[in-house]
Image (spheres, rainbow, N blue to C red):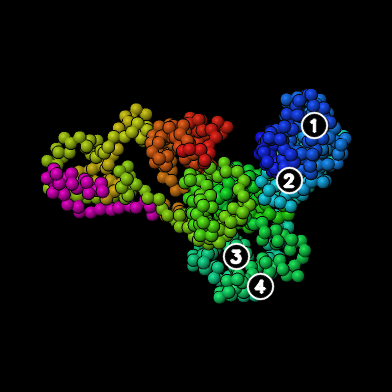
Amino acid sequence: MGKRKRRKNRSGRPLNAGGGSPAERQSPPEDPALRLESQAIDPAVPPERVADSLLAYYEGEHVPGELAFEIVREASAERARDIARAALELEPTSLPALTLAGAVAEALKEADACVGYYRKAVEISPDPMTHWCYVVALQAADRNADALEELERLSRLDPAEWAADPLYRDSYVEALRRQTLFSDADACPCGDGRSYDDCCRPRELAALDRFLDRSPFDALRRAILQYEPEAEDLEPVLAEARSRWFMEDVDRERDEGEARLFAEWAWTCARLGEDEDDEEEPGDSVLRLFLEDPATPGPLRRQARQWIRGVRWGLWLIKDPTPDPGVRVIDLLTGSTLYASIPHEQIDGLVPWTAILGALVPVEGVWRTGAAFYPMSPSTADHLASVILGLAGGVAKQVAGSKRASRLDPYGGLPATVVAEQMGQADELVCHFVSHMVDLALPELLGLLHEWAREVPALRNMDSHPLLLIKADIAVADPASLQRHLQDHPDFRMHEDEIVWMGRPMTPGEAEASLAGIKAMARTEGIDAEDLDPSNRWTLGTVELKGSVLTLDTNSEERLEAFLEVLGGFGAEPEMVARTAVDPRAELARRAADPSELSMPADVEGWGMSKAGLDAWARTWPDEAVPALAGMTPRRAAQHAQGHILLEALLRDLEHRAAANLRRGVVDVDVAELRAVLGMSEGHRPHVSATSPV
Ligand SMILES: [Zn+2]
């Protein structure tokens, strides 16, 4: 009944709300809808009288299905049937009589009768609620081929509404499932009596083909590409758009995906024949000229119109990139969900929780991705979403005043990848506005993404100093006395030829992870290290003393400085005679420049760790304070309203990274295990809401 409730307000008249036009006719103090409801379940009132007042009250309208369920539950199935029969006798073809009879049949699980009443109802009603009930009835009667064809028709009329409805996806998923479920001779589930092969299979296959078939869309894009050179004044406008987009970055211009994304964006964005002094004349886009050209064939013109009117630019989160046959995408900027047809060559490389920046175009009722989109990790998407919503909020504030603008920051700073899906379908106007913002700012947004991808993470050591691998030769005045000082000092420990310089104590988690790492390393080198004592302090460096020169290995300028100070304190009069330094950022910068790494968040933790190190990390991480959780431990965050949302975002990012690593053959953390430990597994996830107090 969840679906029915969700749709309740769509029928125009919620069952228990007061007001509404029929209430104007001499309404007693009591709510007429409530009065109707109590009459309906009162056995003292004859069914004919109930039917009569019901038809009068819902004249020309769809009767809410809840009423039928209520009568069945509170009175009896027999009474519900009597009232429906009486209503049909009074008005055999009116919308209230047919929808009441349909709902009663639904409540009594009489699937075929239900289909029959609603089919008659949709013939006379434009109400989406009626069509929705008809599709539900078809699905309940196992007439999925009919449901699919009806959904295709409805989605062509209103793709934003229907391709967002779970019903739409359900029918495609069911059609795909049936292809392997039923064999040749199986009776068709629709009850027609023929075999599935002779009945619904061909129709369901045809619907699946239409859903997956990109060729009409490809034909449209090819036709526009051919048309492009014919557009007047295009060259200078395109050159300007190109330089704004690529900013002279040759590598980006050579990237095939980005070049395609640019091309499609330019069809609608580059304004031709624009007169800079005349703001009233914004000029035409290539797509619009193509649409208006009388030489353009009718079907292509229709699709071009669908593109211009319906295109949605956005940042879409894909939880599961396995097509079934479509892919559910959530717009991180509005919370709206669509079920889209994405071709294999685009979806195959993606891992769970990938977000894509790009356009979805409704072509003959099916949402399709354009020629390219830009994929990113969920954490990058969260940053980008807040940038775009910030932009949109700023513009909205200027246009409509601050009151309305505040609605454009729906997430209150929480990660969009977690809270967007809780928002439900957004208003069409908001969707168009946000899509337009993304469209306008797309070159700059992509520039930002490239900048972030190039940005090398600040690698730091345990003291938060920038990491620099230093080897320094230091001459000292009195080596014998220095050696005695070092031996007596609690921060230095003699270890064969080496002196180990030690820092702060490790937390238990740090100690376990570090020990596991050392053991794993020792095993690969064939050294027996199983009995190794856990070192409970961080090593700051190692010192080798040869004659009057000592060699220090350490990993930051700060530590080198501190060491020289320690030597000075011992009266060693240190003097640096040679040093080499390696900056590990250089290696990471090379990685970041490799586009295949773009979807990988550059996170040092877990990166390059052995399996044993990862396991140790996963064991202790739940109980260590994490900066990204506002300093909470994951275990604490799991119990905390806002912490829960932040933790979920973090786990999704880990899942995304682990899946990407797995694909490259690199071992990563077992996030399912982490989720289980934290009570954050799918299905056990408590409801999180952006509007609940945090
Ligand atoms: Zn059939």
Disc 1 and disc 4 in contact, CB within 8 angstroms:
no
In the image, which disc is placed on residue 269? 3
- Distance from disc 2 to disc 4, alpha carbons, whole Å, reads 41 Å
Q: Which residue in the structure is indicated by mark 4?
A: 231
Amino acid at the residue labelled 2? Pro
The kind of secondary structure element at disc 1 is helix
Label 3 or label 4, whichever comes before in sequence order? 4
Tag 3, which secondary structure?
helix
Q: What residue did someone put label 2 on?
A: 128
Q: What stretch is highlighted in magenta?
A: 558-587
Q: Is residue 604 left or right of residue 200?
A: left
Say whether mark 1 is within 8 Å of ligand 1.
no
Cα distance, mark 3 to mark 4?
Answer: 14 Å
> Is 365 or 44 nearer to us in this picture?
44
**Residue 566 in magenta?**
yes
Q: Which of marks 1 and 2 is in front?
A: 1
Looking at the rendered structure, the kind of residue marked 3 is Cys
The residue that mark 1 highlights is 50
